Image (tube, rainbow, N blue to C red):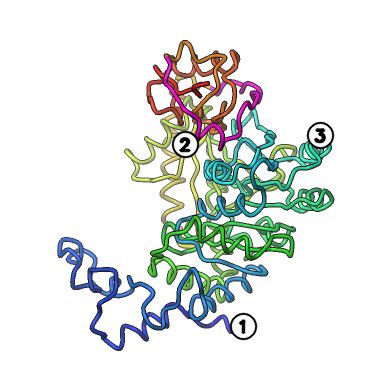
Amino acid sequence: MNQNQTPILEAIEAFTEKKPAYFNIPGHRMERGISRRWTDRVGTEIFSYDLTEAAGLDDLHHPEGAILKAQQLAAEVFGARKSFFLVNGTTCGNEAMVLSCAGEGEKLLVPRNVHKSVMMGMILSGARPVYVMPEYSDNRGIWGSLKPETVQRAFEKEPDIRGLLLVSPTYYGVCSDLQALSEICHAHGAMLLVDEAHGAHLYFSDKLPMGALRRGADLCAQSIHKVTGSLTQSSMLHIGSSLPDEGRVRANLQLVQSTSPSYLLMASLDAARYELALHGSEMMKRAAALAERARAAIRKLKGISCIEPGEEPEVFSELDITRLTFSAKELGISGFALQEILFERFGVSTELADYGNVLAVLTYANTKEDVDRLSGALAVLAEEGDTGRKCIDPLPLPGIPPMELTPREAYFQAKRSVPWRDAAGKIAAEMLCPYPPGIPLVYPGEMVTQEIWDYMDRYRREGHPFHGPADEKLEWFQIVDS
């Protein structure tokens, strides 16, 4: 196909050039109905692209024109059999993947570090999760790859598993051996589903790990907005093989996607695909060069280190070098404190922090000045030296608890709140997820073991952050009312 075209953008432009008397939704009538407080700051032109399924603009849920053509162009770029535009983020892509693989009572193999949207998908589908643990780096304090041996053992124990859904690359840029995982899944008649939210750029450089669709993924969801140029909340779902039922995938996307899709988001996907098709190699070459510039500068700093390609290969199977995970633990500065210092003192904004690390996401749109500002700030801190403070490492996680109810069963059961001191031995109705490390201790439907209670109680008393409970102080906890 001719990648030098943008069907959705062109359809919108053709529509607006007619200057129609507009009686469709949305009600702001292009720029005329937008608050002046906003347009005075950003101008008016972009608002003419915020349209609906008007004449010639196609329909996301039944595409036959511009949207269909744009999706076909995307499929060619990424090497998919079919591609679908998502306007509810990769969250809805993950939900659709679960729904398209495992129904009520069917088993889905899931590492504990998956995104919470996978849990949402299991609530919708009724799938029964079979949990496994990815590898863990004690040195870096982050979760790594999912080993093929771990997956093989799971299939030997549970041969009726319908599929494996994992995140690769992780937030920290850690990839798993997807080729090996796909071969294991297919040997057992199961599908490989990949949450590739952080990996749409992997298809455009041999300096990066290979993308999931090129390593045997049957379904793959990508956040195009994260590092490849579309607007926030715009993503894609790809079918990579003949195993998924295309009709089922389409139906499930209609279940989880908005019936009022944003043409701004779809146009941004169209434009991002165009840039990747024509310039993707140059874009990722620039991102990789910037990442190496940052690493080279950090290597010279005393007391500050960065995860390097080839480090701990038994934990980090492969690494996306454009993810810069660095630490100043040797200076006595925690990741949380380092992130705050970088922003407050130096005006450097980073993506996330944990106990020991800070993550900076580098893309083709960064500049040498950005990188030098980051490395210069770290150089100042290195020069200042050891703060004399002791950084706290995360505690070793308890084992995976017994699952008494599926996520769906737990979600629809009656619930009640009990004092946290009484939660041990009860079935959780909400998640407990210390952050970091960002892996849930307990999911809804699982037993709060004494080991988990002891871990979480210490975590709570020491004032560390956690996600999941409705009561942010964890004085009360929701359980299934059995």
- Mark 3 or mark 2, which has the lower sequence index? 3
Mark 2 and mark 1 in contact (Cβ < 8 Å)? no
Disc 2 target residue:
353
- The percent position of residue 152, horizontal first and vertical second, equals 81, 40
Q: Is residue 416 magenta?
A: yes
Q: Is residue 299 visible?
A: no
Q: Nearer the viewer, residue 89 or 4?
A: 89
Amino acid, disc 1:
Met
Q: Is residue 15 left or right of residue 164?
A: left
Q: Is residue 246 magenta?
A: no
Q: CA distance from mark 1 to mark 3?
A: 45 Å
Left or right side of 229 for 16 = left
Crowding around mark 1 (Cα neighbors within 10 Å: few <14, some 14 to 19, many 20+) is: few
Q: Is residue 409 above or below residue 367?
A: above
Of badges 1 and 3, nearer the viewer stands 3
Q: Position of residue 92 (x, y in %)?
A: 51, 53
Q: Is residue 268 left or right of residue 39?
A: right
Instruction: Give how far apart the Cα atoms at labels 1 and 2 are.
Output: 42 Å
Q: Is residue 171 left or right of residue 470?
A: right
Q: In whole angstroms, how far apart are the C-alphas of marks 3 and 2?
A: 37 Å
Q: Which residue is mark 3?
A: 157
Assess disc 3: are there few (<14), some (14-19) or many (≥20) residues with their C-alpha within 10 Å of its C-alpha: few
User: Pointer 1: what residue?
Assistant: 1
Q: Are marks 3 and 2 in contact (CB under 8 Å)?
A: no
| Mark sitting earlier along the chain (1/2) | 1
What kind of residue is marked 3? Lys
Q: Residue furthest bottom?
A: 18
Above or below, comparing residue 177 to residue 403 in the picture: below
The stretch of residues the image draws in magenta is 393-418
